[in-house]
Every structure is written in structure tokens, then in C-alpha cells.
Amino acid sequence: MMQNYIDILRQLNYELVKELGLFKHRAGLSFSQRHILYHIKNNISLSIQELADFLHVEHSTMSRNIKKLVQAGLVDIYQDEKDKRRKVITLSAAGESRLAEATDSINETISKILEVLDDEEIEIVIHGIHRYCEALKEN
């Protein structure tokens, strides 16, 4: 029976990742770019290393992503006032706008998805996904 659950969850994980790809390139942003912009917006004074650690990616990977976002005018890099060796990443006005556009688009899609579920089913889905994420963090 356990193997059956494993097979089902593996398939559902695959489907979720595949379907999340539908959110790709909302407002011209990739999933990873939106994720980075979201964390920059919600965490003041992050360095590239801190952002890489937070999102569990290598510094070099984050550095390449940030470089593309700087070139696109979506983020700015400043020297930290208190520690001149440290560089801080912030969202530009264009980055704020693009992230808001992408978020609105995704929220609209999720809203349409939720329309086919009743309140009880929505609560079950939220609880199940929340619990599943907690278990993932524990392992």
C-alpha cells in the first residue's frame, strides 16, 4: 500500500510541477525570476549570497539570475551603507510593477481554478498541501 501512495504522490508532484509551468512567463518573467523578485520585495537588504541561501541555490546560479534582472532593469544593486564590502539587491520601480502584474495574472488563474471547488474542498486542498510541505521540510 505504501508503494501505491509513493507512486501516486510522485505522479501528482510531476503534474503540479508541469501545471505550474503554465504560470511560466507571466508578465514576461520566468518562474525563477518571479520567485527571486518576490523574495527581494519581502526581505529588505538581501545580498546575493543571502538570497541564494534562502532559495537553496548556488551563489553562481543566483548571481547569473540577478545579472539578467539588473540588465532587464528589474532590480538594482547598491553598496551597503554600513558594510562597504556588501552589496544589497532591491527591486526597481519596473521590477515592482512587473512582479505585481505577474502576481495579478497568477491570482486570476488560481481564482478560476478554485471556482470548481466548494469551500470544504478548498480547505482540504490547502490543509493537505500545507501538511505535505511541512513534511518535505522535515526530510
Image: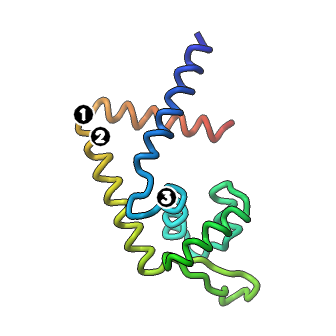
Q: Residues within 10 Å of mark 2 (few under 14, many from 20)?
A: few
Whichever of labels 3 and 1 marks the residue nearer the N terminus, that label is 3
Whether pointer 1 and pointer 2 mark residues with C-beta atoms closer than 8 Å, the reply is yes
Residue 115 position (above or below residue 83): above
What separation in Å lies between label 2 and label 3 (alpha carbons)?
A: 21 Å
Residue 65 higher or lower than 80, as above or below: above
The quarter of the image holding the N terminus is top right
Query: Which of the two discs, 3 and 1, sits closer to the camera?
Result: 3
Q: Which residue is mark 1?
A: 116
**Distance of label 3 from label 1 (alpha carbons):** 27 Å
Q: Secondary structure at mark 1?
A: loop
For badge 2, the amino acid type reads Ile
Instruction: Tell me which residue sits at (31%, 30%) in the image.
Output: 121
State how the image is colored: rainbow
Instruction: Give yes or no for contact between labels 2 and 3 (Cβ–Cβ under 8 Å).
Output: no
The residue closer to the viewer here, 22 or 38, is 22
Which amino acid type corresponds to the residue marked 3 in the rendered image? Answer: Ser
Q: Which residue is mark 3?
A: 30
Label whose residue precedes the other's in the sequence (2 or 3): 3
Q: Name the disc covering residue 113, or none.
A: 2
Question: Which residue shows up at 63% across the image and 41% down it?
Answer: 137
Q: Residue at 32% of width from left, 57% of height from top?
A: 105
In this rendering, position of residue 65 left or right of residue 93: right
- Per the image, label 3 sits on a secondary structure element best described as loop
Q: Residue pushed farthest top? A: 1
